[in-house]
Image (cartoon, rainbow, N blue to C red):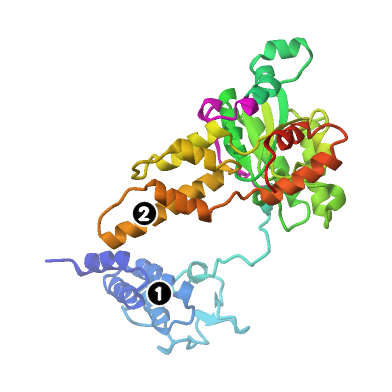
């Protein structure tokens, strides 16, 4: 035959929030001569609802059953069975605190009736600590003191061999950045530290981030990307802490490439900043890159921007982002590689890649992806109407070419103004050469 106590115990464990079930279990525990266990069950209810009448009644019954000679279900001598009622005023039993706090005390200071009322009071006490008050010997931990990873860091496997075309860009990166880093013994012989800063700039959507990943792969380094949202914080001083945190994370993973995306937003000109936070972020970047305490050996800091002329001049001085490489729209070879990648996993038929390459001069990588996606949508719509999959054909791509145009026109106009009127130091010579040879349409 099933033990009712065991069955109820199992039921309470499965349904811990069922008050009625728990109190029925407590009543049976009292009847079974286990008052302490009954009080524990009732205490669970009273912690949530201190005024629960049925739970209080169970506690009284359990306490009474524990007294010497007390019967189950009775109350202390001279007491009353009403909830919250008083006990005998003339006996040595427990009485209510006259302060009205509801606590129970013993007139003689001892449990002469066989019940340890002080222990019971502690059992039913509310242990919830007061808000905003730290316990003695403890310290409140500020969220800013906690070490939280700024961003995911991983080992990069992409290399420059995975970058289609752009041979001039890859050669410039190899000569000015990779070779000195790949031969540390030679660099040390000439007094060069194993650190570096490189700024990739050019029109949007032309693969600057992909090239940064490839550089990390060439160096066999970990790769950590930082964007504006990882840095800026609405609270005073937190943005600088975030900058320090990402540098510390990258230093701990050295050799590592720390890549700042949209550098003109993170390290914009301090003179143009509307809030002091922009200036302090740039100041912190300067400290981290070449401050007295900066330990950056094995840390390579890369950045990408569409508007290098908006980056603070101090960040482009020697020892910081002192090398700049222009990454323009993909050349013929690169456009063919990009088109192949985006067409590879789609059904195609009769595609003339050579004709597409010739007709997409001036397109960015993002524009080429949009072109293929638009053509795929046209073929998909026909497939849905016909009830059978039709591959992408040249007419789809020609129709897409009438809709998708190069998106770098506005950028080209701004770049032309800089190359013609703000290139006194020669830092934009690569950009000026590209504008002369390619003659892109603004």
What residue is at 63 percent from the left and 83 percent from the top? 99
Pointer 2 or 1: first along the chain: 1
Range of magenta residues: 146-170
Cα separation, mark 2 vs mark 1, equals: 82 Å
Q: Position of residue 98 (x, y in %)?
A: 61, 84
Residues 360 and 151: in front is: 360
Look at the image and tell me whether residue 266 can be seen: no
What residue is at 74 percent from the left and 57 percent from the top? 235
- Residue 181 is left or right of residue 13, and the answer is right
Q: Quadrant of residue 263?
A: top right
What residue is at 73 percent from the left and 14 percent from the top? 187
Q: Position of residue 343 (x, y in %)?
A: 41, 42
Please check the rendered image and state whether residue 160 is part of the magenta-colored stretch, yes or no.
yes
Q: Which residue is mark 1?
A: 63
Q: Nearer the viewer, mark 2 or mark 1?
A: 2
Question: Which mark, by number, is residue 379?
Answer: 2
Residues 418 and 113: in front is: 418
- Residue 52 is left or right of residue 191, and the answer is left
Q: Main secondary structure of the magenta part?
A: loop
> Mark 2 falls on what kind of element?
helix
Q: Position of residue 215 (x, y in %)?
A: 60, 28
Look at the image and tell me whether residue 410 can be seen: yes
């Amino acid at each position: 035959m099933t033990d009712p106590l065991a069955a109820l115990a199992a039921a309470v464990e499965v349904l811990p929030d069922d008050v009625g079930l728990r109190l029925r279990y407590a009543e049976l525990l009292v009847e079974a001569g286990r008052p302490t266990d009954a009080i524990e069950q009732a205490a669970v209810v009273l912690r949530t609802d201190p005024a629960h009448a049925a739970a209080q009644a169970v506690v009284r019954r359990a306490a009474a059953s524990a007294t010497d000679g007390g019967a189950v279900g009775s109350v202390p001598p001279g007491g009353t069975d009403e909830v919250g009622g008083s006990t005998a005023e003339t006996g040595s039993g427990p009485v209510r605190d006259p302060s009205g706090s509801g606590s129970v005390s013993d007139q003689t200071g001892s449990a002469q009736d066989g019940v340890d009322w002080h222990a019971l009071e502690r059992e039913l006490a509310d242990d919830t600590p007061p808000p905003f008050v730290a316990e003695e010997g403890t310290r409140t931990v500020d969220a800013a003191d906690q070490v939280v990873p700024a961003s995911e860091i991983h080992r990069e496997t992409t290399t420059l061999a995975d970058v289609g075309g752009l041979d001039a860009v890859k050669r410039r990166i190899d000569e000015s950045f990779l070779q000195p880093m790949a031969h540390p013994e030679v660099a040390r012989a000439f007094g060069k530290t194993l650190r570096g800063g490189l700024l990739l700039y050019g029109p949007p959507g032309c693969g600057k981030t992909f090239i940064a990943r490839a550089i990390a792969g060439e160096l066999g380094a970990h790769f950590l990307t930082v964007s504006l949202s990882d840095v800026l914080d609405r609270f005073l001083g937190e943005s600088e802490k975030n900058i320090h945190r990402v540098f510390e994370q990258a230093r701990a993973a050295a050799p590592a490439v720390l890549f700042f995306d949209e550098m003109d937003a993170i390290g914009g000109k301090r003179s143009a900043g509307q809030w002091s936070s922009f200036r302090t972020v740039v100041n912190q970047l300067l400290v981290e890159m070449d401050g007295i305490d900066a330990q950056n050996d094995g840390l390579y800091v890369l950045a990408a921007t569409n508007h290098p002329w908006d980056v603070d001049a101090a960040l482009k001085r020697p020892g910081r982002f002192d090398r700049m490489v222009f990454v323009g729209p993909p050349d013929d070879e690169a456009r063919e590689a990009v088109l192949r990648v985006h067409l590879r996993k789609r059904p195609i038929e009769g595609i003339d890649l050579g004709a597409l390459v010739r007709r997409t001069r001036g397109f960015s990588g993002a524009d080429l992806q949009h072109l293929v996606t638009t053509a795929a949508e046209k073929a998909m719509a026909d497939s849905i109407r016909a009830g059978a999959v039709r591959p992408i054909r040249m007419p789809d791509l020609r129709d897409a070419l009438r809709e998708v145009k190069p998106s770098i026109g506005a950028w080209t106009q701004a770049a032309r103004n800089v190359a013609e009127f703000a290139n006194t130091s020669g830092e934009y010579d690569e950009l000026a050469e590209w504008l002369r040879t390619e003659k892109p349409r603004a």
